[in-house]
Amino acid sequence: MTLDGVPVALDGHRIVLRRCAGELCELSGVDLTAPDRALWTLGDTAAARGIDPAGIEVPARPDRPPGPLDAARATGVLPAVPLRFDPAQGWIQLDAATGFPVGRILAAPEDPCRITVTGEPPRALDPLQPVPLVLTVCSAPDGALRAAAFRAGERLWQSQASPGGDWSVRLDQGRVLATGTEAGTATVGEIVASEHRAAWTAPGADQGAWASTFTARLGIDGARMIVTNQAGQLVAYDTADGADAWTLPLPTDAGVRGSLAAGTAVVLDPAARQRPLAPRGAQRLRVIDADRGAVVVETVLADQVDAVHPVGGGRALVTADGHSLLLGP
């Protein structure tokens, strides 16, 4: 199958393509089950704006708007909702079947906003049929942020204004995570806007009773933050409300490190020696499905581990002793 254009969105079996000839561009929708004829076509410009990459931290106020393909290049994933920036109206959602606008204007053209398409938050109403969300976060002149989530072009929730400051934002899993400094302070902090409440809160807003037992944080995204605690546990808490998502045992909280990205966690901890000739300094490596807390891969590495990078789908790229391995199903 040959498609005339560059893919910019994929909604089920319908794909949205962009093609340009000089300064003239157009968007078209194609049914992949009958690709010989476009379902619809809209005019576009070579200088069209693109959405922001989901799950990647970016400055709240961009120096320049992202290009139409920047997000897909950064994440390797096409958004499941086609979005278009109209210089006169602002950001709108398109129906992939007809090209018609869906619902309300998502963000005005003059507003400095970040916008992207993400998955639903944890504990979605129907996890077997997830519905993608559109997230926006817009900046006021003093740096205050206001976030909103949309489904099918209609607003689900909108946050109150955050404190003013210098923020970077990550739009992920139906939430907005902001990192930076509040105006008048030099201390870096984090705040979250979510479906639970209008006010921005600290990550895991309701887990203050347990926070004093944390010994290290391995990673955070829009869905969960993963920490180690004094009880010898690896625990995932909901980023927005602090609900306990899952728990795994740790032999010790000393020397534990890891990372979280793309719904996958990678954890390294010292491996216990089971026999006298076993190498010293070996490490146990676990690749974990961060949604379920299920260990997908568990192995012991004798070589020095230089770097670990979760790559999604329960897989991880591990560099040890100068060699890189892709572990996972």
Image (spheres, rainbow, N blue to C red):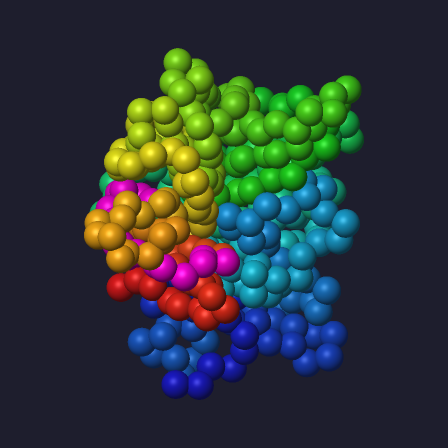
In screen coordinates, is 36 left or right of 191?
Answer: left
The residue that appears at 45% across and 76% down in the rendered structure is 38
How many labels were placed on the picture? 0
The residue that appears at 21% across and 52% down in the rendered structure is 275
Image location (x, y in percent) of residue 53? 56, 53
* Membership of 292 in magenta stretch: yes
Image location (x, y in percent) of residue 199? 53, 20
The residue that appears at 65% across and 77% down in the rendered structure is 20
* 194 or 216, nearer to the observer: 216
Q: Where the C terminus falls, by quadrant?
A: bottom left
Q: Where the N terminus falls, by quadrant?
A: bottom left
* Membership of 98 in magenta stretch: no
Image location (x, y in percent) of residue 52? 59, 52
Q: Is residue 329 visible?
A: yes
* 245 or 77, nearer to the observer: 245
Image: magenta residue range: 288-306
Q: Residue 184 lies in what quarter of the image? A: top right
Up the image or down, 79 lies above or below 162; here it is: below
Up the image or down, 282 lies above or below 317; here it is: above
Extreme residue toward the front, this view: 276
